[in-house]
Amino acid sequence: MRWIVLLFRVPAEPSRHRVAVWRELRRTGAVSLGQSAWLAPAAPAFAAGIARAVAIVQAAGGEAVVLDASGRQPADAERLEAAYTAAREAEWTEFLDECGKYLDEIDKEIAKGKLTLAELDEEEQSLERLRRWHRELRLRDVLGAPSAAGADQRLKACEAKLEDYTQRVFRAVGGQ
């Protein structure tokens, strides 16, 4: 596996520049290797995010170096892949937790009898946010973290729960 490594330095103040770089790298799916050292797979989708981070560094008056890398030994390559997979696994775990909260929220609304169009609209927006997040995670998870398949199933459960809730709301407000 080939990797892109970004090494950068930005002025300590104002801190917003360092935060902006950090946010862009996280959004890209890069993994921190240490202070100001980040790793991402060598693929076009990741290269574009790294380029955006470099532009932020340079706009802040900092310096950036982008390197192509791979592990020299099999153990090195395994460590890089493990670090990347662990980061994706943490994201999938967070996604699964949010899906659980979504399912609980709809169950709570059903139990309370809160079957309104306004609530339905909120739940539809929440599901769309989960779908966007899922798509983003899928794009970044090029190595296939273990929880990815479970996340696919959990998203389908959220979609099914919303469909059930939608039918209940329409019956409650006089629809079909």
Image (cartoon, rainbow, N blue to C red):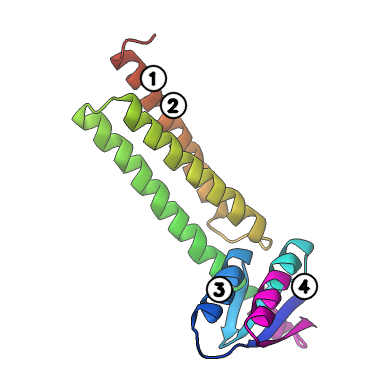
Q: Closest to the observer: 90 or 114?
A: 114
Image vertical order of residue 153 relative to residue 83, above or below: above
Dot 4: element: loop
Looking at the rendering, which quadrant does residue 102 occupy? top left
The type of residue carrying mark 3 is Ala
Disc 2 target residue: 163
Image vertical order of residue 126 relative to residue 22, above or below: above
Dot 3: element: helix
User: Percent from the top left, x then y, of residue 117?
Assistant: 34, 25
Within 10 Å of disc 4 (Cα), the crowding (few <14, some 14-19, many 20+) is few
The type of residue carrying mark 2 is Glu
Q: Give the alpha-carbon distance from disc 1 to disc 2, as whole Å.
A: 6 Å
Residue found at x 56% / y 59%: 146
**Magenta stretch?**
51-79
Of discs 4 and 1, which sits in the foreground?
A: 1
Q: Give the alpha-carbon distance from disc 4 to disc 3, as whole Å.
A: 28 Å
The numbered mark, 4 or 3, whose residue comes first in the sequence reads 4
The numbered mark, 2 or 3, whose residue comes first in the sequence reads 3
On residue 167, the disc is 1
Disc 3 target residue: 20
Residue 76 in the figure: left or right of residue 31: right
Marks 1 and 2 close (CB-CB < 8 Å): yes
Marks 2 and 3 close (CB-CB < 8 Å): no
Disc 4 target residue: 1
Residue found at x 26% / y 33%: 109
The numbered mark, 4 or 1, whose residue comes first in the sequence reads 4
The numbered mark, 3 or 1, whose residue comes first in the sequence reads 3
